[in-house]
Amino acid sequence: MAVVTYREALNQALREEMERDPNVFIVGEEVGYYQGAYKVTQGLLDQFGEWRVRDTPIAEEVIAGIGIGAALVGLRPIAEMMTFNFSLLALDQIVNNAAKIRYMSGGQFKVPVVFRGPGGAAHQLGAQHSQSLESYYAYVPGLKVVLPATPKDAKGLLKSAIRDDDPVVFIESEVLYGTRGEVPEGEYTIPLGQAEVKRPGKDVTLIAHSKTVLLALQVAESLAAEGIEAEVVDPRTLRPLDSDLLLESVRKTHRCVIVEEGWPFCGIGAQIATTLYSEAFDTLDAPIERVTSADVPMPYAKPLEAAVVPDTKRVRAAIDKVLYRQ
Amino acid sequence: MLRPVAKGVKAMEKATLLSLYRTMRLIRRFEERIVELINRNEIPGVTHEYVGEEAVATGVCSVLRPDDVITSTHRGHGHILAKGGQPRRMIAELMGRESGYNRGRGGSMHIADLSLGIYGANGIVGAGAPIACGAAFAAKLNGKDRVAVAFFGDGATNQGVVHEAMNLAAIWSLPVIFVCENNGYAISASIKEMATIERLSDRARGYGMPGEWVDGMDVLAVRGAAEKAVAHARRGEGPTFLECRTYRFVGHFTAERALNIRYRGDEEIAEWRKRDPVETFPAWLEREGIATAAETEGVRREVEGALEDAIAFARASPFPQGEEALDGMYATSYPNLPARGV
Ligand SMILES: Cc1ncc(C[n+]2csc(CCOP(=O)(O)OP(=O)(O)O)c2C)c(N)n1
Ligand SMILES: [Mg+2]
């Protein structure tokens, strides 16, 4: 296995899918000549030319819409959102159109478009540039929502997203782009809708997605030294949610902490918790704990930002609570 | 080169002319000092510097009243300084201090000062245009002759909401001046490839409002055009689209140099630098005998002092406390907000 960055893994997925299928193309701001605002599309313009790697004006709604229109005709568009914060300007196309056209048309159309780009906070970028919006999209029937945490998942899931016949919201992470990990040689895909155990354990289940997987793993390692074996489970796809694997883990550990960077109210963690409560209530030895960002727009100053986002301390405190260790 | 002195300019007070220079110089040096502080990690992240575009904000804001409103962009420092923003509180904000304009909650892309009519820099391209319409609508409703200026870039002119705002302002005859700072690029995207027309101000006709094009490197030309547009708006005659052709001498954002991306030639930058308003304007003042070399030097010294003072002030200011992160989200407080999600 080769060790590559998350960014390179995504780039490989795009390149391989574009080589494999001439119907795959990329549209978005700065995807071509600039090689992507975060360099995910590096080299693709040179290889595939300016009609398959298409720089657009700053106009997110039309970027999403052109992807949808081309998808209806049978192409496989990848509409890049420079960051998912700006996808809010495309929400109408994504929610009112991409998500609904298949169903509303009585199944006449397929909408095989991927909306991809980074989401979540980086460091001190302020309120408008630090949002985790996956719960918005996970709310919407008709969409699929994918958030890879590792290079391997990034590549395998993006390939599946591109080949999928439904609209996929594929949210990467700015702070993960530079992280490294093993990626299998040669062709592979990872099916949408399958969670994965990132670290096996028996004492407590930590459910995390995107960059909070790394946080959960970090805490799990430190707990191991204290004789506590945490199991880290990454749903990878939030819609459809692989509740079977999450339930299996919780039935084994009887305790669960859900970690996400989104806001607490109506967040995906609430959905996961309710699923676990209704299906596995009897096996729980403690109420489920959730660690989220605080319920405020992201502040800029470092001490404020640090107080808002999930950190190891808060994850540990939640674990202590479900283990009754205080 | 500056165009020949427009008729009437000579009659402008020397103090006004020197203050235009002071503002431009302040913006330039502010940005340069900010970059130093970023490189020293005293300011986190990135900012979008206004270097090269000083004449636009300076010219436009020089004809605004304190009660007029501006909406700004991600490249907002220049607008804010020109509208009277205090370097002390701006740098403190950039350093994330409690004494900053936004008490450290906002950062570079969100600096605002209600008392000066600065309705915020904005991290979302195009977002300021409809907000300016709202402020202008309020002025109309209240029978005030206040105007609102929406600053935005060439790139923003392709954003749907900017078109929506311009049409609305036109049909309702709102006192808005849409100031398009056409610096030729949106990040690396040349406006030549993102619009088929040479002059973005031609779009004004499509909305039924006056469209003006002005040399954005010439502070007096900008001021003249802005004066006309503001007077038009104050008289209740509606909006103007004012395109200021300008150029940024530096990268899109602070870290661009390190990325080693080239989307424009050095010759192009050098050509525009020859027209640097922060250099050509004081030279012209001296050549025309409006100000002495000692006087322009006095402006520079004063600006350096103001920035030194601002940096010292910011450095000495405390950070906000982590415990306060959840305060102040709503005008009315509720026991169950912020929500805990349980
Ligand atoms: C809605 C939205 N899309 C994309 C971005 C990312 N972005 C920030 S600045 C910028 C370019 C803006 O170009 P222009 O309007 O010409 O202003 P300039 O930077 O040249 O001053 C882009 C694409 C954003 N902030 N908001
Ligand atoms: Mg521009």
Image (tube, coloured by chain):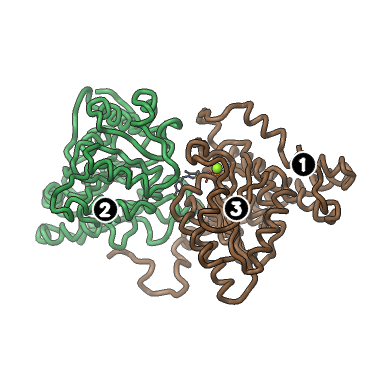
Chain colours: A green, B brown
Q: Residue furthest bottom?
A: B142
Secondary-structure class at tag 2: helix
Question: Image quadrant for the C terminus of chain B?
Answer: bottom left
Horizontal and vertical percent position of residue A90: 36, 51
- The residue depicted at 44 percent of the width and 30 percent of the height is A33
Identify the residue position indicated by label 3 in the image. Answer: B211
What is the three-letter code of the residue carrying label 1?
Answer: Arg
Q: Residues within 10 Å of mark 2 (few under 14, many from 20)?
A: some
Q: Cβ(mark 3) to ligand 1 < 8 Å?
A: no
Give me the chain letter of mark 1.
Answer: B
Whether residue A14 is visible here, answered yes or no, is: yes
Identify the residue position indicated by label 2 in the image. Answer: A97
Q: Nearer the viewer, residue B162 or B256?
A: B162
Give the mark nearest the N terminus, 3 or 1.
1
Horizontal and vertical percent position of residue A307: 43, 55
Secondary-structure class at tag 3: strand
Secondary-structure class at tag 1: loop
Whether label 2 touches label 1, CB < 8 Å: no
B122 sits left or right of A217 in the view: right
Q: Above or below — where is B91 with respect to B41? A: below
- The residue depicted at 10 percent of the width and 58 percent of the height is A279
